[in-house]
Amino acid sequence: MVPVLDEAVAIGDLVTELRAAGSCCVLVVDSGSRDGTPDLARAAGAIVIDEPRRGYGRACLTGADAACREHPVIAFLDGDGSCDPADLPALVAALESADVALGRRVRERLEPGALPWHARAGNALVAAILRRRTGRAVHDLSPFKALRRSALGVLDLDDPGFGWTVQLVARALGATSLRISERPIGFRTRRGGTSKVSGSLRASIAAGRRMLRNAVVETRPRPVVALMAKAPRAGHAKTRLAAGIGQTAALDLWTACLRDLGSSVRRAARQDALGTIAFVPAADEVAPVARSLGPGWEVIPQERTGLGGAITDATLEAQRRRAPAVVVISGDNPTLPAALLSDALAALQDAPAVLGPCPDGGYYLIGFRLESGASALGSQLDRAFEAARLGGSGAFDSTHRALTAEGLAPAILRPWADIDTADDLAALAASVRTAPQGTAPATRAWLERYADLVAQVVRGDAVRGDAVRGDAVRDDAVRDDAVARPTASVSATTIEG
């Protein structure tokens, strides 16, 4: 993926050399060149994408979106010929044991004049800031790098300008589950034209300020929202719900919940500068859950066993990231308001813990205030969850007592219902109907597709096994009078996933 703006002198040879180095295809993203760059790139065998919006990061984002549709590995480099395509195989090979491969420009392979002194100084300063603030090694902010598609999804990049590379490196260093490798590469003088950054001291200063800002902002400690999830597999996720509405419908609903919650929480996280992590029971569940949640989620297998172990793992992971607080939520809350996350974080400013109760006696949210150096927290949580009864209608009360006994008396949020059983569907339908337009679109689509099934459950008719399958349900709308009467009895529910 090569972003360009008026690089006619270099682009033809660059595309040819990249193809010779093993690239299956070269995407050239052009931001309005007037010197014939797009035509020369096509003639050399590149796929050209027009991006009328200016900005280095904007071009990289547009190219990444296109590349990720078909390719598991994407490499980025500038279009001025300064990066040596012969280094591509080494970067790609590094991804056999890494998720992100960063080029590190080494002195012995620098052409004279390739990096002016002010570019070298700024680059070294930003790298030093990132090392110090993340505790992970990085020595360069080279334009040449290769990433797995899955890593790009975790990073969820959005900087449209020259801070894009710093954002990429900073977020990769902050995502502790991502494996990062640096590989030595060369760097040449540009083959023609003038650099948009290092070619001018003023431009270098402006870009340097942006890079320094990103290095600080992207590594700033931030509260973490942790989501408990399971892969949508038969007999593994939403088993109680499946017993009431059938396996196909239950797994379809679970996938819709993850998609909606993943999207809505990520929007809130971007607005309020929160970190987002999902925990799954096993490593083979990382990929399917990541696909369901969408961009911006770092999915990590839990180390401890059980629900209490997952909550403890999430809390300690947030503490390792220097987060001031962590809020853990279940995945079956597709209409969960962002305001409840804000309420939880506000409560943690005064209380050591927070709980969000469900109407049935379970809880949809649990969170903890994190203090640096509080090494006893893991032991406190292990004891609390060992003493608490996490399933059934007494889960909230039991967890409340166990946390209080450990000196973690929780603040209490307003109640919210999650979706564990068929009895919960009426409340879900009513919640979606009254929510603002655009809330939980995947869940809305599920309710429309399974309208007959929902109406059947609301009426109290029995649904056994997989008697009502997804391909046999008509797309009738749920009758207003059917969803307006939530069931009086709601089954036991806890943070489950």
Image (tube, rainbow, N blue to C red):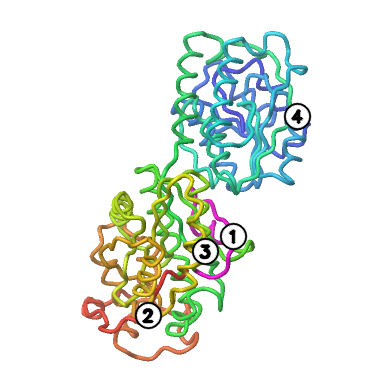
Q: Specify the segment rendered in magenta.
A: 286-307
Q: Are marks 2 and 4 in contact (CB under 8 Å)?
A: no
State the residue at coordinates (39%, 77%): 474
Q: Which residue is mark 2?
A: 492
Q: Amino acid at mark 2?
A: Ala
Task: Give the alpha-carbon distance from disc 4 to disc 3, as whole Å.
Answer: 41 Å
**Residue 259, quarter of the rendered image:** bottom left
Of tags 3 and 1, which is closer to the observer? 3
Q: Of marks 1 and 4, which one's residue comes earlier in the chain? A: 4
Which label sits in the foreground, 4 or 3? 3
Residue closer to the observer: 328 or 445 = 328
Q: Amino acid at mark 3?
A: Ala
Label tally: 4
In this rendering, the label closer to the viewer, 1 or 4: 1
Q: Looking at the image, is mark 2 or mark 3 earlier in the sequence?
A: 3
**Which residue is disc 3 drawn over?**
310
Q: CA distance from mark 2 to mark 3?
A: 20 Å
Q: Of callouts 2 and 1, which one flags the residue occurring earlier in the amino acid sequence?
A: 1
Nearer-the-camera pick, 370 or 59? 370
Inspect the image, locate mark 4, and give the three-letter code of the amino acid beneath it: Asp
Query: Going by the image, does 459 lie left or right of 481?
Result: right
SS at badge 4: helix
Mark 2, residues whose alpha carbon is within 10 Å: few (<14), some, or many (≥20)?
some
| Residue with the mark numbered 1 | 301
**Residue 15's x, y, as percent?**
69, 27
